[in-house]
């Protein structure tokens, strides 16, 4: 399951922060932890946070998550987000585990997503062909 952090402004005040359970005010910076699911298994899941309420940029399996769509923010807000990410890195990472967080534009993220989808589709085709050839190798009596 692919995961990433999405940054943007709140479009309305209907979304709640999952940490403090307060509404995120319209046009305020919100940070979403997005869990993508394979095609056919439902929708992606987004969990939204206020900027100060974000406590981790780690995924389920303790991997570093990419920060997506940060270039859609104003300059001063980009600085705030980068400072918060650096704060989290300093507080939660040990020096031996410290890695660089990637800041991706929406287009770069979409290109990565398309590449993953192509790889999944390709792997599925290979599995189907392997099953077909296994059936062909079996004598007709077993069919």
Image (cartoon, grey):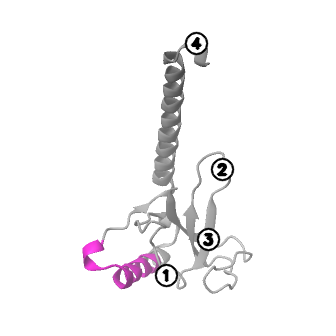
| Badge 3: residue crowd in 10 Å (few <14, some 14–19, many ≥20) | some
| Badge 2: residue crowd in 10 Å (few <14, some 14–19, many ≥20) | few
Q: CA distance from mark 4 to mark 2?
A: 35 Å
Q: Which mark is residue 41?
A: 2
Q: How many marks?
A: 4
Contact (Cβ within 8 Å) of mark 4 with mark 2: no
Percent coordinates x, y for residue 85 in the rendering: 42, 77
Q: CA distance from mark 2 to mark 3?
A: 18 Å
Q: Identify the residue at image location x=57%, y=56%.
A: 36
On-image quarter of the C terminus: top right
Percent coordinates x, y for residue 93 in the rendering: 34, 78
Mark 4 or mark 2: whose residue is earlier in sequence:
2
Q: Nearer the viewer, residue 61 or 9?
A: 61
Mark 1 or mark 2: whose residue is earlier in sequence:
2
Tell me the magenta residue range: 80-98
Residue matched to label 4: 140
Nearer the camera: disc 2 or disc 3: 2
The question of residue 86 being in magenta is answered with yes
């Amino acid at each position: 399951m692919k995961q990433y952090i999405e940054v943007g402004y709140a479009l309305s005040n209907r979304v709640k922060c999952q940490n403090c359970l307060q509404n995120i005010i319209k046009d305020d910076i919100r940070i979403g932890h997005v869990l993508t699911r394979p095609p056919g298994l439902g929708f992606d899941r987004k969990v939204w946070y206020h900027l100060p309420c974000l406590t981790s940029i780690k995924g389920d399996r303790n991997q570093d998550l990419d920060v997506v769509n940060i270039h859609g923010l104003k300059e001063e807000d980009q600085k705030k987000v980068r400072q918060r990410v650096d704060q989290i890195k300093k507080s939660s990472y040990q020096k031996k585990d410290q890695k660089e967080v990637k800041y991706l534009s929406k287009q770069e993220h979409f290109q990565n997503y398309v590449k993953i989808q192509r790889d999944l589709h390709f792997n599925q085709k290979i599995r189907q062909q392997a099953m077909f050839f296994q059936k062909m190798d079996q004598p007709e009596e077993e069919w």
